Image (cartoon, rainbow, N blue to C red):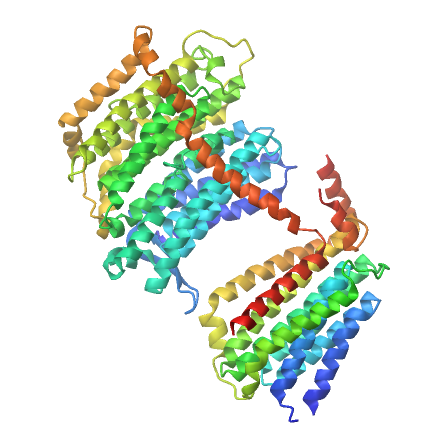
Amino acid sequence: MWHFIILVGILFCSYQAVRDKRLLVSAIWLAGTSALVSIMMYLIGAYQIAVIELSVGAGLVTVLFVFAINIAGDEPIPNLSFIPKWLARIFAVMAILLIGWQLLPLLDFPINLNQDEGFQQLVWENRKADLYLQVVMIFAGVISMLRLLTDEYQIRILHKEVQE
Amino acid sequence: MLQIEPLVLITILVPWFGASVVWLIGDRYEKIQHVSAVVFSITAAISSIAMLWVYKSGTVLSFSMGSAYGDFTFISDGLGLFLSIVATVIGALAIIFSVDYMHGSAQLGRYYSFVLFFIGAMVGLVLTSNLLLMFIFWEITALCSYALISFYNDDPKAVAGGMKALIMTQVGGLGLLLAAALLFAYSGSFDINIFISNPSLFPSNILAIMAFGMLIAAAAKSAQFPFQTWLPDAMEAPSPISALIHAATMVNAGVYLLARFYPAFKDVPGWTMSVMIVGMLSALMAALMALVANDLKRVLAYSTVSQLGYMVYAVGAGDILASQFHLFSHSVFKALLFLAAGAVIHSVGTRDMREMGGLGKELPFARTVFIIGSLALAGIPIFNGFWSKELILEAGLEHGNPIWIYVIMLIVTGLTALYTTRCVWMVFYGENKLDRHIHPVGRNMKIALTPLAIGAFSTWILIGPFSKMMSSSLPVHSIQEVNLSELFNHVVFAPATWIALAVIALGIMTWFGRGTLTGIRQALKPIAGMAEASFGFEKINKFIVGATQGLGESLRITQTGKLNWNVFYILVTLVVVFAVLMIGA
Amino acid sequence: MNISTSMIVLIAVMGLFGVGLYCLLITRNLIRLLVGLQIMVKGAMLLLVFVGQSQGQPSLGQSMALTVIVADTIVAVIGLALAVQVKRIVGTLDIADISKLKR
């Protein structure tokens, strides 16, 4: 029963995030989606990842979105898309139906709530290359974060330099 | 107490750290950029020289990447160590030279950080024993080479030259990637040393594919036949870059690759013969092209291709020591020649030798060092080029190698002497055709040129420690230790040496007697014409480059710049793929 | 009809994926594109965890999902930084106007 309610919540929140005209509200709906996804992960037994998703996906990313939207400001963009809406709908539905068809064999497997002990071992030992790449990615993120925080005045100076 | 493990890391990471520091300093502080680039490169040079006291064979450093990927391993044996010293020391000298050469040039940050990035990658390339990591470093050096050839990015010739170098070396990189993938598929790891000590565990056809894939990679990187035409076009780079990347280090990576894998591939039928023929053809063709070229740096580029041909030939002939010893000598004297040529070009402002002439009086220092480098290149006794070239020629006579290739290589030594003499004469002697103002040679240029000039005299004295390092740390390469007196006996009392010297003398005399030899010159006109047209290989290489760029240009239509449509195309592809899967199922 | 947990999770995956895709197809606002991307990636993440759980290798699925979370967050950071800079320099977030900048 809980599962079903969460499913409906996920679909509703994500749809609202796409549909709502105000960017800020849309970011809040995104946070809601993320939180519900993390609860679902918890329910199928992925406890560690659920916590990380809740704090990073629902927390940090939302803060970033709100922050960026505050800086960039919302603007009314005409609701006309390049692609006709009916075509977009048809293709989106077609894509998920095809994916669903590919996922069909997975239905036969029940979810196993038992944990194995290997999570830490796997993350820290067996997949070290992933870990190093993540460190590199975090560096890239920090640098672009700095760029995000660079205020308008400094940007103007940089601009002048480029033009000269 | 010196430890090898930190030294390996310092030598790779200090230049990389320096690259980001110089970049971040910003172009407003030119002086700090110059100084910090020099400091970082000298630190790397010192730490790589320090490795000489603590080198050992086998893996010295291993970073676990988890069971799914294997280890990233580093080695410090003779082959890699000596190349890393060449890369860092000549890199440091090239950077010192740049302080004068690039003085007042715009965007120094970009220049210095790519040079430092290159030095670190080159050291990594020769000090790693993981083939995947080697491939990554290999591609980083290609990237830096491209970025530096096109450094003057408002000059269309420089951009085209960089593009050509990038595409040609990528073609070769595919060969290396193929070999790495096969190594992983058949042994479950990327470790080179394990592979080299037991190549017989591999099926012979797979071994052959790997061997020839590596040969393609090496030929493309070292500008050997049939890829030789990218190197002359790379001469649009600033002169210190030509000296560092396109004479002393990156182009040697191909020879290094062949030497490193020689024990594994020597029994592949036809491989050593192919290597020898590739080296022979490159040496011959490039020497002929150098005879007719009029651009000072192009002459040096052709001679680089030709000398690299000698090294490749020596690997094919089975003498790794001779090949590496010539690589060592060549790095020193060719870096000297390029930097001296850079000083001359900086002074007179042109690269065309027909507009030079009689510069010896105005630029006595440049003349002296250039002539020292030329004598080493031509193989005149006592200079380092003489000893190493003789070792290669003798290797060509041993081990039952075909005599006709030896004869051609002998003729090429004569040609080398001839074009070297022509080049020196056209630049420094004869009439002065230039009435422009001539800048004097800068102080930092002299600081960089002096050790190289001394090196061109004397590096052959190091044969004893050099061969000891090679033989003691490379057990499977079967390298013999040679000391100085053995080298002396070996070279001076061999009849081959005297034949070679006679050919060299003949080559030099041909230049001075050119007035009386008009009949022969007329007879050789068609060959000269063919050499100017690069024997038709320019066309083939141009075709590859053109096809690659044309493909990219025609695929540009698909980039609408509107994200919605791009996502839509991805989606359509997804639907098609699934539809195919559905029909297949 | 008996609705199992597996089916609910798979429907959630498909729903997230479809909504995200739809968003990427129709929106012209740079920041909203990132929202769509986030939604799509959440679907992929949920699927990774689900496959890990149901195939008896929960740790592998979770470690993959961890990598996805990190990558996804960094993508959001870089994307937002770019969007903010675009807004400052070009003055709009509409991709129709930005794409006119190409040669």
Q: At 54% from the left edge and 8% from the top edge, which residue is drawn?
A: B435
Residue B107 vs residue B532, the one in the foreground: B532
Give B132 or B88, whichever is nearer the viewer.
B132
Q: Is residue B141 left or right of residue A4?
A: left
Q: Position of residue B441 (x, y in %)?
A: 49, 20
Asked if residue C31 can be seen in this view, the reply is yes
Total marks shown come to: 0
In the image, residue B322 sits, relative to residue B266, either above or below, namely: above
Could you say which quadrant of the image residue B206 lies in? bottom left
Residue B189 relative to residue A64: left or right: left
Front in this rendered view, residue B283 or B62: B283
- Name the residue nearer the viewer: B278 or B462: B278
Q: Residue at x 63, y 66 (%)?
A: C72
Quarter of the C terminus of chain C within the rendering = top right
* Residue B228 picture location, percent across and down: 40, 34
Residue B117 on image: x %, y %:
50, 45
Q: Is residue B145 visible?
A: no
> From the image, which quarter does the N terminus of chain C lie in?
bottom right
- Residue A97 lies, with reference to residue B33, above or below; the image says below
Left or right side of B174 for C12: right
* Residue B367 coordinates in the image, percent (x, y): 41, 17
Q: Quadrant of residue C48?
A: bottom right
